[in-house]
Amino acid sequence: MPESAISVKNLTKKFNHSFTAVNDISFDVPKGSVFAFLGPNGAGKTTTIKMLTTLLHPTSGVLRINGMDPVKHPHDVRQSFGIVFQDPSLDDELTAYENMFFHAGLYGVPRSESPQKIEDLMKFVELWDRKDSMVKTFSGGMKRRLEIARGLLHTPAILFLDEPTTGLDPQTRNYIWSYIKKLNEERGLTVFFTTHYMEEAERSAQRVAIIDHGKIVMDDTPTNIIANSGAANLEEAFIKLTGHEIREQEAGSIDQLRQMRQMWRGGKK
């Protein structure tokens, strides 16, 4: 068995001792793999990601991120991953370079190393020529590329992507995924992502876990999920497994970056 970058065993999260948002789930993400975590709105995705990224403590169960316990060692765990949130999180009133430089300081990247790392990453996402441009002048796709570069500044082993291509046109979505795949292939970066675009998961993920009503309903390769569901594609399989009703959005995703920044600035462990 490949070594796990993320290991989740019997994870449960209850709120107010009554509502169970995540109900006894288990899954593993091998190091260097691309893993999709899918589910309808309100299924428990955001709650799970918050526990994986130290923003919530589980009610019960065992979590390991790069072999570390997010509850006991939150600072070390935060150093080991990068994250790109669904909601825009750049400062539009700063330049692209200033956004990167501020983030480097937040994550403790040595000042002697920051300039070269920033240049390398901005060249990687093809934004170096726009380093002095205000972010408010960037397109949605350019902002996403900058957020990905920013999330890699401290050389994490895992990159969490929460619906990274929402609202982007198909050409830009394909462009973003070309960078993500390149990172995975060239650097061995483990990628954990959520998306509502099923074709992205079918095309890019080596393994998919589908959560609904707080439970994992299937965890397998895209090919096996499609075959076992008797579906023509992953979107059809997803609907068969989770139903057709429209769900309300799970609460709590919009403030994730603010929480993370407060933790870093306040030195919370």
Image (cartoon, rainbow, N blue to C red):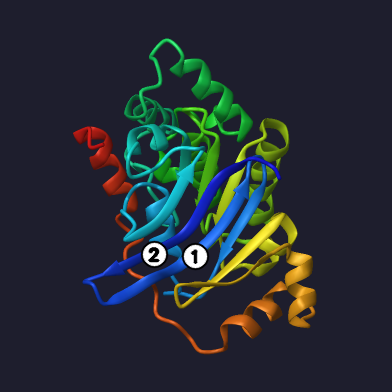
In this rendering, position of residue 37 left or right of residue 17 = right
Circle 1 residue? 25
Front position in the image: 157 or 131: 157
Q: Quadrant of the N terminus?
A: top right
- Going by the numbered disc 1, the residue's amino acid type is Ile
Percent of width and height locating residue 109:
40, 21
Q: Can residue 138 be seen by looking at this rendering? A: no
Cα distance in 3D space between marks 2 and 1: 7 Å
> Furthest residue to the top?
112
Q: Residue at x 50, y 24 (%)?
A: 118
**Residue type, label 2:** Thr
In the image: residue 135, left or right of residue 191: left
Identify the residue at the far bottom of this view: 245
Which residue, given by chain and number where applicable, does mark 2 sit on? 12
Rendering quarter of residue 210: bottom right
Q: Picture coordinates of residue 255 (x, y %)? A: 29, 55
Q: Earlier in the sequence, mark 2 or mark 1?
A: 2
- Look at the numbered disc 1 and give the secondary structure of its residue: strand
